[in-house]
């Protein structure tokens, strides 16, 4: 059977399954979904002039704590990313939460390689490389493909590790944890900007950290001193295509 024939068979099977579901059960499920929260966290990335430049969106769920993610495996990270992408780009009122700005969303390896889909919004989505993603030839090929499609790429938690240096020619933003700048601030920053990427100071938690980042030449800033992450419920926003 050809791939077209297999796709047609699967489509017919899916339609048959849908038709077999009673209308009352469909309505009950729709009501259940409408009342289930669809949560995401949003934190601003600000310019040196104090204006929002972009937003970082990340996973949240009822009862979820960010520390839990430290114990996740590959599948959990992929599902969390898909949730964030659907809750943002999969809803019809994107501008209600994006306000015309870029959206940074951390993506695991499967999204970089094209094994899992990304929304066709290179004008707005900044693909942030997961810190868990293996940096190999396939990953670099995936990043080049995404940039050819118009996506911007961000590299978080830069500390000048060899595998991170391999990514520098392929990224548009480099994030540096300001808590790591006390020891080797200038050398790390010099390498981070060596291919022309814009620098983002992460985890800005104190006025001293903000001043230090400014002195090192950072132009974008993210952290609780500037804005704490807020949790948004996207359940009330219409799904795209509905």
Image (tube, rainbow, N blue to C red):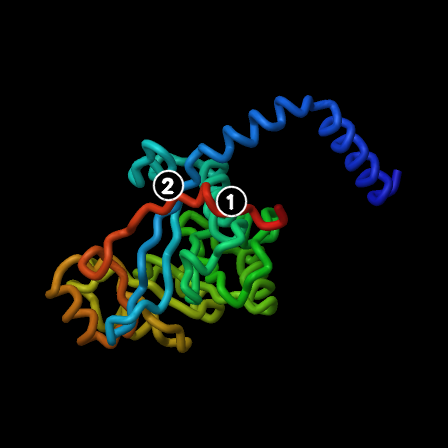
Left or right: 47 in relation to 38: left
Residue at (47%, 51%) from the top-left corner? 88
**How far across and how far down the image is residue 183, in percent?**
16, 63
**How far across and how far down the image is residue 159, in percent?**
30, 60
Find the distance from the CA under tag 1 to the CA under tag 2. Answer: 12 Å
Circle 1: is it few (<14), some (14-19), or many (20+) Cα within 10 Å?
some
Left or right: 20 in relation to 85: right
The residue carrying mark 1 is: 82
**How far across and how far down the image is residue 108, in percent?**
48, 48
Number of the label disc, if any, that sits on residue 60: 2
- Dots 1, 2 in contact, CB < 8 A: no
**How far across and how far down the image is residue 175, in percent?**
33, 63
Q: Which quadrant of the rendered structure holds the N terminus?
A: top right
Residue at (35%, 59%) from the top-left corner? 161
Q: Secondary structure at mark 1?
A: helix
Q: Nearer the viewer, residue 77 or 19?
A: 19
Residue at (43%, 40%) from the top-left corner? 38
* Count of numbered badges drawn on the protein: 2
Q: Residue furthest left?
A: 208
Q: Secondary structure at mark 2?
A: loop
Number of the label disc, if any, that sits on residue 179: none
Does residue 104 appear anywhere in the picture?
A: no
Left or right: 242 in relation to 238: right
Q: Is residue 176 above or below residue 49?
A: above
Please tell me in which quadrant of the rendered image residue 142 appears: bottom right
Does residue 22 appear anywhere in the picture?
A: yes
Mark earlier in primary sequence (1, 2): 2
Q: Is residue 208 above or below residue 83?
A: below
Circle 2: is it few (<14), some (14-19), or many (20+) Cα within 10 Å?
many
Q: Nearer the viewer, residue 50 or 32?
A: 32
């Amino acid at each position: 059977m050809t791939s077209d024939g297999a796709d047609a068979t699967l489509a017919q099977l899916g339609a048959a399954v849908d038709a077999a579901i009673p209308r009352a059960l469909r309505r009950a499920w729709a009501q259940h979904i409408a009342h289930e929260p669809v949560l995401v966290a949003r934190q601003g990335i600000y310019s040196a002039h104090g204006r929002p430049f972009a937003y970082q969106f990340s996973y949240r769920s009822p009862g979820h704590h960010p520390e839990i993610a430290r114990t996740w495996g590959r599948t959990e990270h992929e599902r969390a990313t898909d949730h964030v992408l659907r809750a943002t780009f999969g809803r019809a009122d994107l501008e209600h939460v994006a306000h015309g700005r870029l959206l940074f969303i951390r993506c695991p390896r499967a999204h970089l390689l094209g094994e899992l889909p990304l929304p066709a919004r290179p004008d707005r989505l900044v693909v942030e490389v997961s810190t868990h993603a293996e940096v190999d030839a396939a990953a670099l090929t995936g990043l080049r493909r995404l940039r050819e499609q118009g996506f911007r790429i961000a590299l978080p938690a830069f500390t000048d590790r060899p595998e991170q240096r391999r990514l520098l020619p392929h990224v548009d933003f480099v994030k540096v944890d300001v808590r790591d700048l006390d020891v080797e601030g200038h050398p790390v920053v010099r390498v981070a900007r060596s291919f022309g990427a814009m620098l983002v100071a992460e985890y800005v938690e104190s006025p001293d950290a903000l001043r230090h980042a400014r002195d090192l030449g950072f132009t974008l800033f993210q952290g609780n001193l500037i804005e704490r992450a807020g949790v948004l419920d996207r359940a009330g926003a219409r799904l795209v295509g509905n």
